Image (tube, helix red, strand yellow):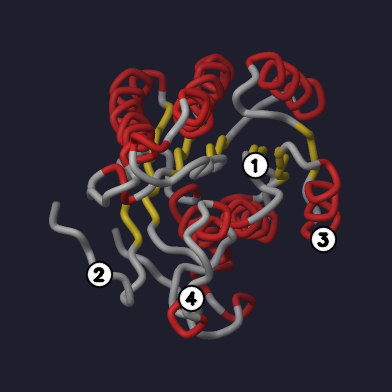
Amino acid sequence: MRLLFSVLPRRFCPEWERTHRNMKNKIAVVTGASTGYGVGIARMLVESGAKVWITGRNESKLQAVAKEIGATARVADVTSAGDWDALIEEVKKQDGRLDLLVNNAGAGIRIGPITEQGDNDIEQSISVNLTGAILGCRRAAEVMISQGDGLIINVGSVCANHAWGGWAVYSAAKAGLLQFSRCLLAELRPHGIRVTSVIPSWGQTEFTDSCGLGPRDPEVLEKCIAPDELGQLIVQIASQPPHLVTEEITLWPMVQPISQL
């Protein structure tokens, strides 16, 4: 896949202007959009001309992001089937369709040796990082099949393909999400629906601190993936013509060593 990022401001970039036209008036849902990558994804989609619904569990943070970027906020927990039902019904009621679902919500929950993890930690990690996305995909697929088109983007992690000690449960969930996405593409493509796995690594987000791994060197953090950079990538994928699909794409910061396991 050819990536066309410009060092010039976006308003002077012909590629960004083309993308902006392609995404105008598209209806998108981005989960986990009160912090981190989700904010950047939602912001870039709004700037591309899409109407964007953002979800998260923290209402105050979610409303603040929505006001800042011009999105529509809806408090929802991705692990709740009822919250998914209410969200999709509201989107259909207000906008009549769903063009793009970005399953971005995820959490480290607890990173460490398997013997130090409680059963609740394990269940919660699988639920947030895998089951929640599956619940959303099922509902989005129903809407998109009736439309005859649509795109689902599942945001995973390089942990799906690489091994680090202490990350076994989180990695298992993300590996499951990657394989689920591959199978879902095979299942939905006859209906004109595309499914893409976006697989980022180290980012300029709160994820490291929330996992209890401590602060990262500021000079290294500066060279990691910025939320808006991941958002630009997702806008480019979403702006491809409907007869093309990006099955999966991995994004690494150059400062990160790549595990060979």
- Where residue 55 appears, as percent x and y from the top left, is 71, 38
As drawn, 203 above or below 237: below
Which of the two discs, 3 and 1, sits closer to the camera? Answer: 3
Residue at left offset 54%, top offset 63%: 18
Instruction: Residue under label 4, please give it.
Output: 221
Residue type pointed to by label 4: Leu
Say which of 207 and 16 sits in front: 207
Considering the numbered disc 1 on the image, is that residue within a helix, a strand or a loop?
A: loop
At 37% from the left edge and 37% from the top edge, which residue is drawn? 174
- Left or right: residue 260 versus residue 187 is left
Whole-angstrom CA distance, mark 3 to mark 4, is 24 Å
Q: Position of residue 115 (x, y in %)?
A: 34, 34
The crowd level at tag 3 (other Cα within 10 Å; few <14, some 14-19, many 20+) is few
**Which residue in the protein does label 3 denote?**
68
User: Would you name the residue on which mark 2 appears?
Assistant: 257
The first of marks 2 and 1 along the sequence is 1
Q: Residue at x 14, y 51 (%)?
A: 261
Residue where numbered disc 1 is placed: 26
Q: Earlier in the sequence, mark 4 or mark 1?
A: 1
Q: Is residue 229 above or below residue 186?
A: below
Instruction: Evaluate if marks 2 and 3 touch, with contact meaning CB atoms under 8 Å apart.
Output: no
State the CA–CA distance, disc 3 to disc 1.
20 Å
Helix, strand or loop status at disc 2: loop
- Which residue is at the far front? 116
Instruction: Determine whether the residue tagged by mark 4 lies in a helix, strand or loop.
Output: helix
Q: Quadrant of the N terminus?
A: bottom left
Residue in the foreground of this view, choosing between 58 and 152: 58
